[in-house]
Image: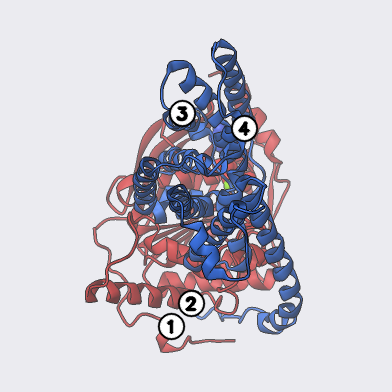
Chain colours: A blue, B red
């Protein structure tokens, strides 16, 4: 192992080794941007129960990249176009509901299959071998350029600004669609709008984690946060904090170890989720007794207004 | 029993005065078709300001559809509806709505207070980041208003827990608070007593009447059982077999009226304590088959 970076107990020297190479600084910057974007958009996705739609969008990286290679365009552009097209195809069909399960899973599944089939077709049409296939699926932190970072930053800023604009009506339509619509919230347009924002977040995230491991950043942080708190703002803050921890640990450890970054981010995400769920489960046991005493019955109001 | 609520739970401000003259709701010769099928036709209804009115009828009669038509959520095949003197879609900010049976399952990770708060600011774009004094003052006033309505429906004890963990009745109270939070001039409630036990049906009915009187709100609610509402109702509208009859309870719910609405013998009995029992009410499929026979 001589000559290779080695992990020591001296954290300062570890961090110094980490940032010694520009490619690693770029990777950390890209990871940070993506972690924040995925944690916030993912918070809505988990609340809306659109994980299946999110997964389908992630898979679109495959036809996106294969199609871009065939057309001679940049891979990242292929990601965004394929994800955006899939979001529009699922479009208004993906009404989330708070009860029952969703019939539109059939539509999403169809889009996913068609996307994979198209990707396979592009791949077989292409005479050149699609390079970096493994990277496409499982991610890498090598080769993130300063340019990539800037594009990611711009994309994240636009996506988060769009989400901030619709934040409250989207929350309203997610939790309470009928009433939101009756109050004038355009729930159908928000469905499509959110899928587009989600598609951007997925396309950006998959450039760091790879298409198949997007969920390490898109689902685990918000799901863990929502298990801990039911309050929107602290939930979002926690989600971002979890996302950052996962990315930084994942990149840092991957740098010193022979295993790929996709494995490490996913491992940390999974570990975090398990720890939080177990912690909440254990914590609830103690909290339950307190609730039962606080609950009580309704205070009965008397019908004094009966004209 | 809290007879009189503490003064703080009610806004010191007077109940909202009607901003526009005329009745709260005026439905004239309205017909609605859904999926090529006529749900009802020729419905006439007026809800006066501050009136407390119930819509009754068997399953599938079109009660929910009528509420949605009044909210401007379903298109009309014929007739006109005006709400607070305006077309339904324009009066939305002044209307509170409680849809039928909205259970939140255990996985819904949001607090009751946040849901009530969305009733107040859920239609606003952007995020509340203003740090100027008026912006902060407005947010404080909104939090105060949310607290007020939650106390008004006696839900303070559980409003800070995840809504999915609450019982159906507890959820119902918070949803009523949500419908009230914007100080609507008109409340449209689709089966607000659904899922409540008998004492709580009486309590919620009394609560709604109190809101109607003290906040000057017109209330239009759908109910299956008229009995818990009997002491408070100004009028009822009975919807069955695609038609509607409106009037005072005693005039509408009679053996003769219901028998002619259903086209089969129905008997209305009154118990010693004034409660009403409707006997021989056909089930919804019967009503439906009538409609299918009609040539379209
Ligand atoms: N979207 C729709 N498409 C087609 N038909 C519909 C639709 N919504 C409702 N209907 C039909 O319209 C009729 C009235 O439905 P509505 O929900 O208004 O009944 P209701 O009186 O509220 O019944 P309940 O007491 O069961 O709530 C029913 O026959 C129903 O099948
Ligand atoms: Mg109904």
As drawn, A234 above or below B296: below
Mark 3 packing: few (<14 Cα in 10 Å), some, or many (20+)?
some
Residue at mark 3: chain = A
Circles 3 and 4 on the same chain = yes
Residue labelled with disc 2: B152
Badge 3 element: helix
On residue A134, the disc is 4
Q: Which residue is more in the foreground, A19 or A37?
A: A19
Name which residue lies at 61% across and 24% down: A116
Asked if ligand 1 lies within 8 A of label 4, the reply is no
Q: CA distance from mark 2 to mark 1?
A: 6 Å
Residue labelled with disc 3: A75
Circles 4 and 1 on the same chain = no
Residue at mark 4: chain = A
Q: Which residue is more in the foreground, A158 or A265?
A: A265
Q: CA distance from mark 3 to mark 4?
A: 14 Å
Residue at mark 2: chain = B
Residue at mark 1: chain = B
Taking the image as drawn, is residue B230 in sight? Answer: no
Q: From the image, state whether disc 3 or disc 1 is nearer to you.
A: 3
Q: CA distance from mark 4 to mark 2?
A: 60 Å
Quadrant the N terminus of chain B occupies:
bottom right
Badge 4 element: helix
Badge 2 element: helix
């Amino acid at each position: 192992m001589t000559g290779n970076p080695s992990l020591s107990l001296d954290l300062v020297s570890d961090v110094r080794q980490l940032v010694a190479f520009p490619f690693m600084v770029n990777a950390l910057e890209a990871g940070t941007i993506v972690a924040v974007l995925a944690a916030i958009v993912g918070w809505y996705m988990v609340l809306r129960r659109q994980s299946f739609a999110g997964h389908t969008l992630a898979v679109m990286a495959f036809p996106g990249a294969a199609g871009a290679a065939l057309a001679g365009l940049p891979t990242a552009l292929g990601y965004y176009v394929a994800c955006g097209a899939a979001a529009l195809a699922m479009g208004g069909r993906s009404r989330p509901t708070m009860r029952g399960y969703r019939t539109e899973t059939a539509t999403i599944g169809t889009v996913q299959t068609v996307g994979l089939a198209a990707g396979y077709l592009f791949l077989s049409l292409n005479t050149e071998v699609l390079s970096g296939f493994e990277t496409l699926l499982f991610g890498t932190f090598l080769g993130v350029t300063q340019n990539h970072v800037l594009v990611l930053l711009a994309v994240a800023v636009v996506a988060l600004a769009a989400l901030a604009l619709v934040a409250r009506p989207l929350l309203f339509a997610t939790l309470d669609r009928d009433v939101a619509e009756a109050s004038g919230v355009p729930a159908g347009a928000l469905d499509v709008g959110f899928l587009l924002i989600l598609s951007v977040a997925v396309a950006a995230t998959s450039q760091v984690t790879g298409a198949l491991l997007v969920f390490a950043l898109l689902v685990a942080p918000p799901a863990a946060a929502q298990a801990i708190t039911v309050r929107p703002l602290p939930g979002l803050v926690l989600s971002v904090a979890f996302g950052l921890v996962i990315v930084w640990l994942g990149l840092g450890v991957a740098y010193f170890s022979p295993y790929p970054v996709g494995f490490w981010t996913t491992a940390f995400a999974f570990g975090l989720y398990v720890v939080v769920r177990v912690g909440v489960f254990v914590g609830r046991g103690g909290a339950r007794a307190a609730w039962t005493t606080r609950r009580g019955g309704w205070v009965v109001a008397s019908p004094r207004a009966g004209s | 029993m809290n007879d009189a609520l503490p003064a703080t739970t009610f806004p010191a401000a007077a109940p909202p005065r009607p901003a526009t003259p005329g009745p709260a709701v005026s439905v004239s010769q309205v017909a609605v078709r859904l999926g090529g099928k006529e749900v009802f036709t020729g419905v006439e209804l007026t809800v006066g300001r501050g009136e407390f009115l119930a819509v009754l009828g068997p399953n599938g009669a079109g009660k929910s559809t009528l509420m949605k038509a009044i909210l401007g959520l379903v298109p009309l095949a014929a007739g006109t509806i005006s709400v607070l003197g305006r077309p339904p879609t324009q009066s939305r900010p002044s209307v509170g709505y409680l849809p039928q049976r909205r259970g939140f399952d255990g996985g819904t990770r949001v607090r009751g207070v946040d849901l009530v708060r969305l009733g107040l600011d859920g239609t606003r774009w952007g995020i509340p980041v203003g740090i100027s004094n008026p912006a902060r003052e407005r947010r404080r006033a909104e939090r105060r208003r949310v607290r007020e309505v939650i106390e008004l429906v006696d839900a303070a004890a559980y409003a800070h827990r995840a809504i999915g963990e609450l019982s159906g009745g507890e959820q119902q109270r918070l949803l009523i608070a949500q419908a009230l939070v914007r100080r609507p001039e008109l409340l449209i409630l689709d089966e607000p007593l659904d899922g409540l036990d008998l004492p709580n049906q009486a309590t919620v009915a009394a609560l709604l009447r109190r809101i109607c009187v003290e906040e000057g709100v017109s209330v239009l609610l759908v109910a299956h059982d008229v009995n818990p509402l009997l002491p408070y109702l100004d009028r009822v509208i009975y919807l069955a077999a695609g038609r509607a009859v409106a009037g005072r309870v005693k005039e509408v719910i009679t053996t003769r009226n219901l028998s002619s609405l259903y086209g089969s013998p129905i008997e209305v009995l009154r118990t010693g304590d004034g409660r009403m029992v409707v006997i021989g009410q056909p089930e919804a499929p019967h009503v439906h088959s009538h409609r299918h026979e009609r040539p379209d």
